[in-house]
Amino acid sequence: MSKLTGKAAFVTGGSRGIGAAIAKKLAADGASVAITYVTGKSSAEAVVSAIESNGGKAIAIMADSADPIQVDKAVSEAAVLLGPIDILVNNAGVFPTGLIGDTNDADFDRAFAINVRSGFVASRAALKTMPDGGRIIFIGSSLALRVQGPGLTVYSATKAAVAVMSQALARELGPRGITVNTVHPGSTNTDMNPADGPWAASQIGAMSNPAGFASAGEVADVVGYLSSFEARSVTGAAWTIDNGATA
Ligand code: NDP
């Protein structure tokens, strides 16, 4: 029996990149997985097909993380279709950049809605069914810990907010054995941050171990561990995967 057999997982933004890798990892470990997407229907369907062709169970739900009603509804729908949500991964995110003078209030609000509020709403919704011993994992960013250049004010602030929200929730949910952790990826090769993109060389230059970009699968492996029974004593923690960029 795989270590997550019988568990249900909900992964926001599971159609591409890190979220898709997490969905596949949790499914490979035995969980039934619901993923959300906003525009990437065909990508989401491809993730579901890949999981099913490996013998797993997955569903894709369109839910814009900017809209709390859609997020809440998607979590409820997943719980009806898959059962109580044991594992929630708040992954969906956007990467706004720009100097403060070029950033308007709507940009700021949208980034906080998707990167921060959606994780709050999904957690609240998932906790309606989550059994004791459940898992909540937030995907943060190494930019919450060290800001390596200008133009990252809003994004870094969203990810720092996520990390503190995760710590606070860990305190609240500890008595139920529900662990809450943040994973802080550094440079990870996805559509958001391609390893051959214009800023790739400067990111590698900031690493103390110049191994280059991580793969989405490396982030997923850490999420897989944090989702497991073995990680029952890990809570309120923040785990970087950044080749030492913040060390
Ligand atoms: P990608 O841009 O490659 O993928 C983003 C995923 O989030 C897609 O599945 C996308 O769905 C979904 N998404 C985006 N906006 C919304 C929305 N409004 N509602 C629902 N889903 C949405 O990003 P990554 O995989 O690189 O990033 C995943 C997470 O990791 C993010 O939180 C990001 O901030 C974080 N991160 C990434 C790093 C990197 O170097 N790549 C470094 C540090 C943190 P759709 O296909 O429908 O667009």
Image (cartoon, rainbow, N blue to C red):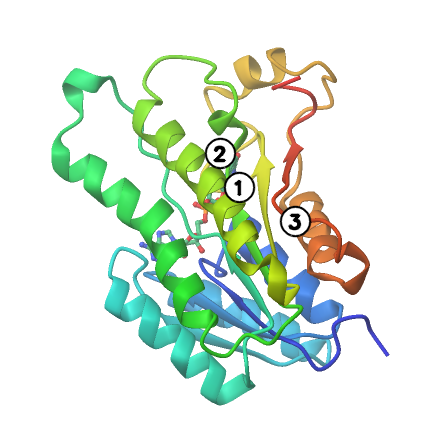
Above or below, 15 relative to 127: above
Quadrant (top left, top right, bottom left, bottom right) of the N terminus: bottom right
| Apparent side of residue 158 relative to residue 142 in the rendered image (left or right) | left
Q: CA distance from mark 1 to mark 3?
A: 27 Å
Q: Considering depth in this image, is 231 or 81 the residue closer to the camera?
A: 231
Q: Nearer the viewer, mark 2 or mark 3?
A: 3
Q: CA distance from mark 1 to mark 2?
A: 5 Å
- Looking at numbered disc 2 in the image, what kind of residue is underneath it? Asn
How busy is the neighbourhood of tag 3: few (under 14 within 10 Å), some, or many (20 plus)? many
Above or below, 104 relative to 50: above
Q: Secondary structure at mark 3?
A: loop
Residue designated by label 1:
190
Residue designated by label 2:
193
Instruction: Answer whether labels 1 and 2 touch (C-beta < 8 Å).
Output: yes
How busy is the neighbourhood of tag 2: few (under 14 within 10 Å), some, or many (20 plus)? some
Mark earlier in primary sequence (2, 3): 2
Residue designated by label 3:
235
Q: Say if disc 2 is inside 8 Å of ligand 1.
A: yes
